[in-house]
Amino acid sequence: MFKTFVIYKLPEDFNLDPNLHSEMFEKLKAKPLTGAIKTKYGWAELLQSNKPYIKLENDYIFRIEKRFRSVASSTLDEAVRQKMIQLAQDSPRTWGVNAKVSSQDVKNLREMCENLLIPKSLTRFKDIIVWFNTELKFLFIGSSGNKEVEAIIDLFKLTFKTFPASPLTVNNDVSSVFTSWLSSLELPPTLAIKNGDIAFENRANGANKVRYSNQDIESDEINANLLAQKRPLQLSCEWNATLGFTVNNELKFSKIKQLGLLKEKIKTANKEMEINNPAQEMEAKRVKDMTSYTLTRLSILNLIKEILPSLNSSTGFAGGAQSNTSELIEGFVESID
């Protein structure tokens, strides 16, 4: 469902009903790139539903398709070089050896060459899943790139006219919370800090950062950084033996992995189905994807509910309730079957 995500918050009184906006979904559906357009986002059908969304309980899952294309730097450099040679021959006073060519002139020429080459470039595609949770009024966006997230929010605003979403904020400094977690203080009961990617920043000098990959969390190096009161910027975590992930101090979640029972249930979701032709293969994939959306959504929701209290979310969510995720997963699988 997600490899990475960020969370946006909608007002408590906000209600979302995609069924009222069919015309806008059609108008803003994903279309071929034309002219010199490099990137465009549009709605795309989700799970053979004939719509770009599905409803799971009271929540909505959306599918957005990003279409994009680019020119390789080496190709663009060569195009600019050849164009400058031609211009030097045609207009020696402006572009010749002794001409004063400004950096802005070169930049404009580069943009012109890129616009000529873009229509000849191959279009690439990327699916982005977005989930709106009606209980918390949270929008989970399957991306962590700032420009990409902004473009997705803009698409929602164009579609729904009113969409007052803003990034989730918390009252506590997230790095300070990370420090308490690393010290095993106030660590949520089913959250574990794991060996993996971790980053620190010098409190006095933000430019002084150190990053570790596949690092032993109990190593002397990690302890030394904590003793030096450096700010943790990123942690690798595991929640309730069902989700592995990395989270940074901007609350961007990445490297999400399904573990244990969650992974097994998704893996075997369609094992009893006959797959003898393309139609059956498509249906088997749909069942597996639906299981993934349903169960991963459940796990992420319970994860967020559990860590919000220690982050002291400004949303006012009280938190603290814990769920037996194994039992919940079993129940959801039965309902899917």
Image (cartoon, helix red, strand yellow):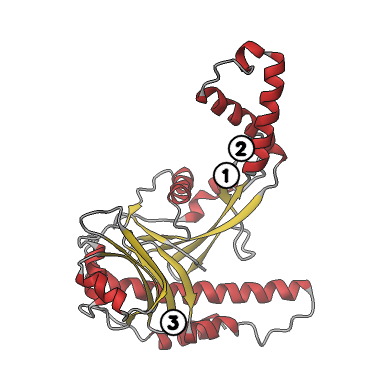
Residue in the foreground of this view, choosing between 156 and 178: 178
Task: Label 1: state its secondary structure.
Answer: strand
Question: Left or right: 39 with respect to 142?
Answer: right
Closer to the chain start, of discs 2 and 3, is: 2
Amino acid, disc 2: Ile
Q: Are marks 2 and 3 in contact (CB under 8 Å)?
A: no
Q: Which residue is mark 1?
A: 40
Identify the residue shown where x is 51% and y is 25%: 103
- Please say if 154 is above or below 168: above
Residue in the foreground of this view, choosing between 194 and 10: 194
* Residue most extreme to the right: 277
Identify the residue shown where x is 21% and y is 77%: 186
Marks 3 and 1, how far apart in space? 35 Å
Identify the residue shown where x is 47% and y is 69%: 255
Marks 2 and 1, how far apart in space? 8 Å
Residue in the foreground of this view, choosing between 71 and 212: 212
Q: Is residue 204 visible?
A: yes
Q: Which residue is mark 3?
A: 242
Q: Is residue 34 visible?
A: no
Q: Are marks 3 and 1 in contact (CB under 8 Å)?
A: no
Amino acid, disc 3: Thr
> Label 3: how many residues lie within 10 Å, few (<14), some (14-19) or many (20+)?
many
> Label 2: how many residues lie within 10 Å, few (<14), some (14-19) or many (20+)?
some
Q: Which residue is mark 2?
A: 37
In this rendering, the count of numbered labels is 3
Amino acid, disc 1: Lys
Marks 2 and 3, how far apart in space? 41 Å
Closer to the chain start, of discs 3 and 1, is: 1
